[in-house]
Image (cartoon, helix red, strand yellow):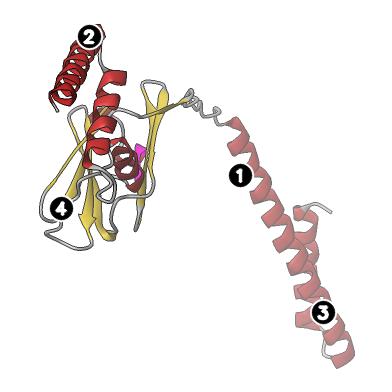
């Protein structure tokens, strides 16, 4: 039923309510009046909703430019140093200072951090460093973005302690490369191990020099034996 017809019915019920004096008829008319008023209210709400939908459909669709992040590049080149309170990691990324602040994210744990730079020149850049040499303070650590550089500040959990390496893995690798000196064995054996490593890693000139020194040493030892 159209809203106009309902409105006419409502006016007629109101007129009848004013004229009737019998309770039973009055109650019935009052109930009918409430019913018609509810119908009119619902019709009005539906009409308003349809109008809003039409207006919404008439709006031009918003054009959302796709954000192309391309592939993720793993960062392997960086530099680091330290102060009494911080271990500082420097990552060079051209144009990083021009991306939105929220595009540069760093997550810290007590023994790691990971950096993610989103949508820099169509690519994302990632760096994950696990097994830091010593624990850091998560709350005290932070990042700074400077011209073409991301600076990661790892707050040392124990201040005034020196880090010889950035990670535990780096420490273990470096220590494996060091020549081992076993004090319980013959000292000359330790020297032989060092000379052997130098010989293996050296170029042709270094090998000729060591061979010459070895021959001369053996000749001297032979002369010493004959003198006795």
Q: Which residues are magenta?
A: 103-107
Q: Is residue 211 above or below residue 1?
A: above
- The answer to whether the residues at label 3 and label 1 have Cβ atoms under 8 Å apart is no
Q: Which image quarter holds the N terminus?
A: bottom right
Tell me the SS state at disc 2.
Answer: helix
Q: Identify the residue at image location x=24%, y=26%.
A: 195
Q: On the picture, is 81 further left or further right than 46?
A: left
- Describe the element under mark 3 as helix, strand or loop: helix
Q: Circles 4 and 2: CB distance less than 8 Å?
A: no
Q: Earlier in the sequence, mark 4 or mark 2?
A: 4
The answer to whether residue 105 is magenta is: yes
193 and 2: which is toward the camera: 193
**Could you tell me if the residues under marks 1 and 4 are in contact, i.e. CB atoms within 8 Å?**
no
Q: Residue at x 34, y 58 (%)?
A: 110
Front tag of 4 and 2: 2
Give residue 50's position: percent from left, percent from top: 68, 45
Which mark sits nearer the N-terminus, 3 or 1? 3
Q: Which residue is mark 2?
A: 208
First in residue order: circle 4 vs circle 3: 3
Cα gap from disc 1 to disc 2, whole angstroms: 92 Å
Instruction: Say which mark, if any, is on residue 225.
Output: none
Residue on which disc 4 sits:
162
Residue at point 22%, 36% (across, down): 188
Give the class, few, some or many, for how many residues have Cα within 10 Å of label 4's Cα (few <14, many ≥20): some
Residue 52: mark in rendering: 1
- What residue did someone put label 3 on? 31
Q: Position of residue 178 (x, y in %)?
A: 26, 37
Q: Quadrant of the C terminus?
A: top left
- The residue lying toward the viewer, choosing from 81 and 140, is 81
Do the residues under discs 1 and 2 have CB atoms within 8 angstroms? no
Secondary structure mostly taken by the magenta-highlighted segment of the chain: strand
């Amino acid at each position: 039923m159209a809203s106009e017809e309902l409105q006419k019915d409502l006016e007629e019920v109101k007129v009848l309510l004013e004229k009737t004096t019998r309770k039973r008829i009055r109650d019935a008319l009052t109930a009918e009046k409430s019913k018609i008023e509810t119908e009119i209210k619902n019709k009005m709400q539906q009409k308003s909703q349809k109008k809003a939908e039409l207006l919404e459909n008439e709006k031009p669709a918003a054009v959302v430019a796709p954000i192309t992040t391309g592939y993720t590049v793993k960062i392997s080149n960086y530099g680091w140093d330290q102060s009494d309170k911080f271990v500082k990691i420097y990552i060079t990324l051209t144009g990083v200072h021009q991306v939105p602040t929220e595009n540069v994210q760093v997550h810290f744990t007590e023994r790691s951090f990971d950096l993610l730079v989103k949508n820099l020149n169509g690519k994302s850049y990632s760096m994950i460093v696990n097994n830091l040499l010593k624990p850091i303070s998560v709350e005290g650590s932070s990042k700074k973005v400077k011209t073409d550089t991301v600076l990661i500040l790892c707050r040392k959990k124990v201040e005034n302690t020196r880090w010889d390496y950035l990670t535990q893995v780096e420490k273990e690798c470096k220590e494996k490369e060091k020549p081992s000196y076993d004090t319980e064995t013959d000292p000359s054996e330790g020297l032989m191990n060092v000379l052997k490593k130098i010989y293996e890693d050296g170029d042709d000139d270094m090998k000729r020099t060591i061979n010459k020194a070895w021959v001369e040493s053996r000749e001297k030892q032979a002369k010493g034996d004959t003198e006795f």
